[in-house]
Image (cartoon, rainbow, N blue to C red):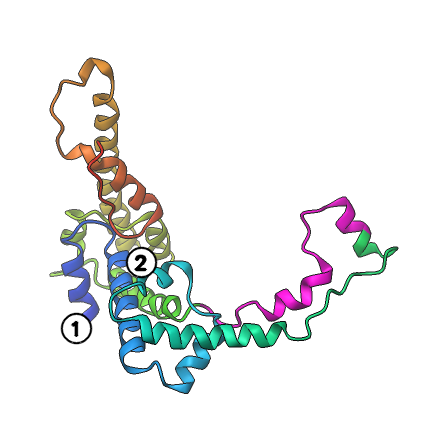
Amino acid sequence: MSRTASYYDLRDALALPGCPVCRLTARDAGRYLDGLLWEHVTDPGVRAKVRRAQGFCRDHARVLDRAGASLGVAILMQDVLRGALETLEGARFQAPPALSRRRAQETLDPGQPSAATAELVARLTPEDPCPACARAGEMEAGYLDTLVEQLPGEEGLLDAYRGSAGLCLPHFRMALARVREPAVFEALVSAQRGVWERLEAGLREQIRKNDHRFRDEPWGDESDAWLRGLTAVSGGAPLESGIS
């Protein structure tokens, strides 16, 4: 079986803390943003894509908070805000008639979106997803396909997977949805079960050592099990803390 760049990326990432797919997609999104800021910020097509997306999602906006990014971000955000200001020009409050069914529904259920502002809300709603999310999604799919395809077999990724932190729960679900062969299913499920059993044991030990009867016992690898548990269940980059 031929080896792709994704195979080697996954093999290397499996040797590091946390979900390898979370790690790699975050890296690739960061590289995409670097290229956008340093090479394509004046590209009309790229700027139009950012405008259609109404900028970036909260997580990727935070990635852009770094040295040297100010000019590129300013150019892109000015585009987005200019478009938002144009949308606000001539905006009207379009209240439904006092005796209409919609007015009655809103009176009975204040949590319903306001019909009076629905048109403006729609015009301010992104047409496209966050560009960095879209790029990360493309790469994420490729890594998961590679993992499933190259998990078993000689020089496959199974041994590396068994010794790793495994996939986070969201990416494990996505990987399972790609499995078509029983042998791959057994390998993937068995490896992930082993990963979670080790983590659950660490969580159990951390809980035990918080009991006043055992608080004098020294801490080991279980001291950060709670953080590893968070990322294992929710995904994302490995968390760090000095709290045990």
Residue under the image location 29 percent in, 63 percent down: 25
- The image shows residue 192, relative to residue 82, as above or below, that is above
From the viewer's perspective, tell me whether residue 109 is left or right of residue 232.
Answer: right
- In the rendered image, the quadrant that contains the C terminus is top left
The image shows residue 6 at horizontal and vertical percentages of 21, 68
Residue found at the very far right of the displayed protein: 99
Of marks 2 and 1, the one in the foreground: 1
Asked whether 119 or 213 is in front, the reply is: 119
Across and down, in percent, residue 144 comes to 30, 62
Q: Which residues are magenta?
A: 104-129
221 relative to 54 in the view: left or right: left
In this image, 83 relative to 105: left or right?
A: left
| Residue 121 percent across, percent down from the top left | 62, 65
Which of these two is toward me, 223 or 97? 97
Q: Amino acid at mark 1?
A: Ser
Element carrying mark 2: loop
Q: Quadrant of the N terminus?
A: bottom left
Residue 57 bears which disc, if any? none
Disc 2 target residue: 181
